[in-house]
Image: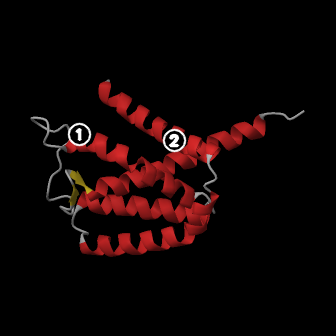
Amino acid sequence: MKSGCFFFCIPFACVFTYYCLDKFFNLDWANAFNNLIVFAAVIILSVTGLLFYDRIYTLVTIIVTIFTLCYLHFIGKKEWIGKASFVYLVLMPGFFAVNGILTGSLIQSPVVNYNPDEFMGIRMGTIPVEDAVYGYSQFLLIIYFFKKLTESKEQKIPSY
């Protein structure tokens, strides 16, 4: 039950942070970088995928992230990718703290262990770099569904 709360509380906190920063600050400037973010990410992830195609965690993370970015940008025509990317950067210190505890050696046995044969082996402290990329795609998808749900709710509310 405790781990189930993690998967509810963390995404909720991320959406709440996005909503508050978007509500109280003008972050529209970040959307000017949508094309650059998608182009650079797809190129970097594609090259990394070609180099590490035999690492399952790396490959799945790359495929999910490329698909998410391409869907949001090219099919969904979402204009908020830059804003969401900036908010994700703001969330990174919390990500490092929580994920560092889960994967770290500060405790006797870490909560999360990774098979070194299944990821690139590049770590940010104790955290595999793939976790940050996976977290980014998860964050984009959560924001997408949050906006989808709030848009449909706003359309149902009659205006007087």
Residue 49 vs residue 83, the one in the foreground: 83
Image height of 104 relative to 83, above or below: above
Q: Is residue 5 left or right of residue 120?
A: right
Disc 2 element? helix
Of badges 1 and 2, nearer the viewer stands: 2
Q: Quadrant of residue 132?
A: bottom left
Amino acid type of disc 2? Answer: Thr
Q: Position of residue 13 (x, y in %)?
A: 46, 36
Report which residue position mark 1 lands on. Answer: 102
Task: State the image coordinates of residue 145 (x, y, percent, origin top left).
Answer: 56, 45
On the rendered structure, is 65 left or right of 155?
Answer: left
| Quadrant location, the N terminus | top left
Q: Is residue 60 left or right of residue 111?
A: right
How far apart marks 1 and 2 lie (CA) works out to 22 Å
Please tell me how many numbered marks the rendered image carries.
2
Tell me: residue 7, above or below residue 134.
Answer: above
* Residue occupying the point 24% across, 44% down: 100
Q: Amino acid at mark 1?
A: Leu
Q: Is residue 98 left or right of residue 26?
A: left
Q: Residue furthest right?
A: 160
> Badge 2: how crowded within 10 Å, few (<14), some, or many (20+)?
some
Q: Which residue matches tag 2?
A: 17
Above/below status of 151 relative to 69: above
Say which residue appears at 50% left-offset and 45% top-offset: 142
Render colour scheme: secondary structure
